[in-house]
């Protein structure tokens, strides 16, 4: 049975914006084209793909995973269920890093996922020397692809990608000016894990033991041995974890201060290594 593009969109039991995003993905056409050609009959493959996406969306699958992309810092990143979906809150971590990194700084990102942080830093500042680690090979492939598409092949390849778990991924004992990370920080018993997009995102990239602080602890503990004197460590964390993160940073030899996101939540804490 044939159907026009407009009919497919009207029949979808979704908010119109979501329906249009899925139709764009299923058809490979942008919004302008779909508006101009809405009265044309959609090919059977487009209709089938769209209806499958709608069914998955009704099941709760995030739009980003269905379309394979999510905007971050004004750029469209490729994503799939092996990586976390980039979130606006994390842009604060990027802004903070760009502000603190001196010219020509060496920056280490731990747990890059889709690469949204490392790639954005590379695109915004071509003077930075960036290393990014990731323990999931599939996620690291996506990060590399995002770097090549968004920064250009030369700049994308200049990011030093390392496969492994936190500092274990590094093959040298060199020191850097700044370490940045958005690690897993959700507590295993957090009820939000059973609702919304979190149900479909990789738990290993979301959940940490010790009430969500285990990976933050590992990063903080290992940072003094990887930073130059006066180097900085910038960490994203949960809205209610800032005080505990500051305490851990201070115990590890850092001066610490926290910045709030646009919603007024304490979201990013920066430590400056004493001495």
Image: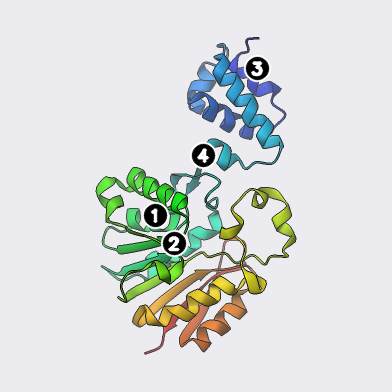
What SS does tag 2 mark?
A: helix
Residue at the (32%, 76%) spot, across then down: 173
SS category of the residue bearing label 4: loop
Q: Quadrant of the N terminus?
A: top right
Please give the residue where the numbered disc 2 appears in the rendered image: 94
Q: Earlier in the sequence, mark 3 or mark 1?
A: 3
Front-lying residue, 223 or 29: 223
In the rendered view, does 208 fall on the left or right side of 112? right
10 Å crowding of disc 1: few (<14), some (14-19), many (20+):
many
For marks 2 and 4, give the CA distance.
Answer: 22 Å
Q: Earlier in the sequence, mark 3 or mark 2?
A: 3
Circle on res. 253: none
Residue contact between numbered discs 3 and 1, judged by CB atoms under 8 Å: no
Residues under numbered marks 3 and 2 in contact, where contact means CB atoms less than 8 Å apart: no
Q: CA distance from mark 2 to mark 1?
A: 8 Å
Per the rendering, the mark at residue 7 is 3
Q: Quadrant of the C terminus?
A: bottom left
User: In the rendering, at what x and y percent does residue 13 appear?
Assistant: 72, 29
Quarter residue 42 falls in: top right
Q: Cβ–Cβ below 8 Å for labels 2 and 1? A: yes
Disc on res. 68: 4
Image vertical order of residue 63 relative to residue 197, above or below? above
Callout 3 crowding tier (Cα within 10 Å): few <14, some 14–19, many ≥20: some
Q: Which of the labelled discs sits on residue 120, or is there none?
A: 1
Among the two numbered marks 3 and 4 on one chain, the one whose residue lies closer to the N terminus: 3
Q: What distance separates the C-alpha of mark 1 from that of mark 4?
A: 18 Å
**Residue 54, horizontal then vertical, whole percent:** 66, 30
């Amino acid at each position: 049975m044939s159907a026009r593009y407009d009919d497919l969109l009207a029949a979808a039991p979704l908010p119109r914006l979501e329906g249009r995003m899925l139709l764009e993905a299923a058809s490979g056409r942008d919004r302008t084209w779909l508006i101009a050609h809405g009265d044309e009959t959609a090919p059977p493959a487009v209709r089938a793909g769209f209806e499958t996406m709608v069914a998955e969306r009704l099941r709760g699958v995030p739009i980003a995973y269905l379309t394979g992309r999510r905007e971050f810092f004004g750029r469209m990143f490729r994503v799939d269920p092996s990586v976390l979906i980039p979130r606006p809150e994390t842009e604060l971590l990027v802004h903070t890093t760009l502000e603190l990194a001196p010219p020509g700084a060496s920056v280490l990102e731990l747990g890059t996922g889709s690469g949204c942080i490392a790639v954005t830093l590379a695109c915004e500042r071509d003077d930075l020397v960036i290393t990014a680690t990731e323990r999931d090979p599939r996620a690291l492939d996506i990060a590399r692809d995002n770097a090549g598409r968004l920064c250009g092949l030369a700049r994308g390849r200049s990011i030093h990608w390392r496969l492994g778990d936190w500092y274990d991924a590094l093959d040298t004992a060199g020191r850097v000016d700044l370490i940045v990370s958005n690690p897993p920080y959700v507590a295993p018993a957090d009820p939000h894990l059973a609702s919304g997009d979190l149900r479909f995102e990789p738990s290993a990239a979301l959940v940490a033991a010790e009430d969500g602080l285990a990976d933050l602890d590992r990063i903080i503990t290992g940072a003094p041995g990887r930073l130059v004197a006066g180097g900085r460590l910038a960490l994203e964390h949960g809205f209610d974890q800032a005080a505990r993160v500051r305490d851990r940073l201070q115990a590890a030899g850092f001066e610490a201060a926290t910045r709030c996101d646009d919603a007024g939540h304490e979201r990013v804490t920066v430590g400056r290594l004493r001495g």
